[in-house]
Image (cartoon, grey):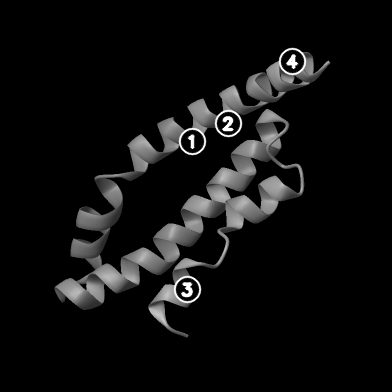
Amino acid sequence: MEPRALRELPSVDTLLAERGWDRRFSTATAAMLAGSVAIYALGLPWLAHVQDLTFEQTLTQGFALFVVGDLLKLYLAAALLPVAWAAVRRFRG
């Protein structure tokens, strides 16, 4: 598969959101967590290969530096999504 074709595939969290997983905190959190896991699962081996890193270096440079911020951002977004959907429902009538 060409890199451009791969970029055009929908993400895991997008597919779950299209199925309504973005309507409640618990399912929004699960969908976003699944998306993050997919990103790390594909990104960390790529980083290790391109940068010729050991497993420990890969975890330090590609995971440990980002995971706390990613989880905080995920939690905040999952908390705000149901509120945003409620506002949309009120606005639409």
Q: Which tag is nearer the camera, tag 2 or tag 4? A: 4
| Of pointers 2 and 3, the one earlier in the residue sequence | 3
Residue type, mark 1 in image? Leu
| Of pointers 4 and 3, the one earlier in the residue sequence | 3
Quick one: label 2, few (<14), some, or many (20+) residues within 10 Å?
A: many
The residue that mark 4 highlights is 91
Residue at image position (20%, 75%) is: 50
Q: Which tag is nearer the camera, tag 2 or tag 3? A: 3
Is residue 89 in sight in this rendering? yes
- Checking the image for residue 27, the label placed there is none
- x%, y% of residue 25? 66, 29
Residue type, mark 4 in image? Phe
The residue that mark 2 highlights is 78
Measure how far apart labels 4 and 3 are at the Cα level: 36 Å
Measure how far apart labels 1 and 4 are at the Cα level: 25 Å
Based on the displayed image, in which of its 4 quarters is residue 40 positioned? bottom left
Q: Secondary structure at mark 4?
A: helix
Q: Secondary structure at mark 2?
A: helix
> Which residue is at the far front?
92
> Which residue is at the far right?
93
- x%, y% of residue 91? 74, 15
| Of pointers 1 and 4, the one earlier in the residue sequence | 1
